[in-house]
Image: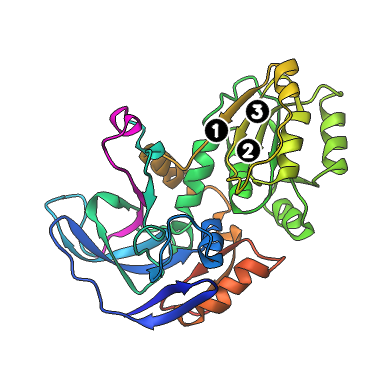
Amino acid sequence: MLAARYLGPDRLETLEVPVPSIAAEEALIKVEACGFCGSDLGIMAGVHPRARQPLTLGHEICGSIAEIRSSNPELKVGDRVTVFPLISCGQCLACRSGQSHVCRTLKLYGIDTDGGMAEFVRLPVSSLVKLPPSMLPFVGAVIEPLAVAVHGVFMAPTESVRTVVVLGAGPIGLLTGLVASSRGGSKVLIADILSSRIQLARELGLTAFAAGEELNDAVEALTFGEGADLVYECAGSASSAAAMTSLLRPRGTVVNLGVFKKLVEVDMQAINFKELTVLGSRVYTREDFQTAISMANDLPIRRVVTHSFPLMQVQTAFDCFRNGNDVCKVLIVPNGTPA
C-alpha cells in the first residue's frame, strides 16, 4: 500500500509499505480522508519532541472498516468510522481519575506511532468511533478538530455570556466560533491577522475582524467599553496572549485552546486586578467526540476544508498547508483527486 512517510526534517514521501496485519481487538481501516494538523508542522520541521522517523503522519482520520477481529457487536466490516487518536497510560493520576485526555505521558497515533495518512491503517478497536453512514468522509475527517473546539467551548458556562471573542481564525478558531455560535444567546466575534481567514470566517456566517485595533474597537462599541465576557484563545501566539486579558471585562473568562510553542508574556496584573478566570483546554474526551458527531452535519464543516489532494501528492499538500495564505483545512484523500 501507499503511505505518507516522514523521513526526517522537510522530507515527506509517498512510499510503498506492507499492508498491516491485524491481531485480536484490532481493525484494518481503509482511509477515506485524513487531515493535516498544526502538530505536523513541528514534525516536519524536525522539532517535535516525540515524533521519530520513519513515521506515517495523520491523526484526523475518516475511513471504513476493511477487516476486524473483535467481538464488539457494534462494529462490522463496511462501517464508516473516525478515530479517537489519544494513547493514554492508564496508570497516572489523570488516568486513574477518569481524565485520561490529560495523561502525564499522552501520545497520539500519527505522532508517536504510525497514523492514517495511508491507504490503510491498523488501529485498536477501542480507538474507533462509529459515524453515521450518511456522513461524508470530508466531514468525518474534521470530527477530531471539531472535538477540540467542543471541549474548549464547553469548558466555560455560557448562560449569562453576552459577548464572546475568538482569537485566531485557523481551523480550530473557526470551529470554535461555529460551536460557540451554535449555543446561542451570545454575540460571537472572531479575529485573525490574515485577510483570507477573515473572509472565510465571514463566509461561514461569523462576525470577523482584523486582530488588533479593528477588533478592539468592535469590542469597545459592542460592550460600551466594558469588555468581552469570554475569550477563546485559539492562535497560540504572543499577540493573542497579550490581547486575551485586555479584551476581557472584570471577572471575565479566557479559555486557552491554542498550543504555545514557547513561553510568552501574559499580563498577570490584569488577571489580578480584573479577577479573571483562566482555563486551559487540551484535546478532548470521548464524550466530546460524540457531541462533535451530533453537531457536525448542522454546521458548515465542509467549507472549512479548503483543499484536498491524493496521497501521491502529499508533499504538495503539505507545502500548501504550510505556505498558503488562502488555506484552512487540507485533507489527503488516498484514492481521490484534488478538490
Is disc 3 placed on a helix, strand or loop?
A: loop
Left or right, 269 with respect to 149, comes to: right
**Relative to 294, is 23 above or below?**
below
Q: Earlier in the sequence, mark 1 or mark 2?
A: 2
Amino acid type of disc 1?
Gly
Amino acid type of disc 2?
Ser
**Relative to 1, is 282 above or below?**
above
| Residue closer to the observer: 3 or 208 | 3
Packing grade of label 2 (10 A; few <14, some 14-19, many >=20) is some
Magenta region: which residues?
78-97
> Which residue is rendered at x = 21% and y = 64% of the image?
77
Q: Nearer the viewer, mark 1 or mark 2?
A: 1
Q: Which residue is mark 3?
A: 185
Q: Which mark is residue 295?
A: none
Is disc 1 placed on a helix, strand or loop?
A: strand
In the rendered image, residue 221, in percent from the top left (x then y), is placed at 87, 30
Quarter of the rendering occupied by the C terminus: bottom right
Does residue 171 appear anywhere in the picture? yes
Assess whether residue 90 is covered by the magenta stretch.
yes
Q: Which residue is mark 2?
A: 181
Does residue 310 appear anywhere in the picture? no
Residue 54 image-quadrant placement: bottom left
> Which residue is rendered at x = 56% and y = 24% of the image?
157
Q: How many marks?
A: 3
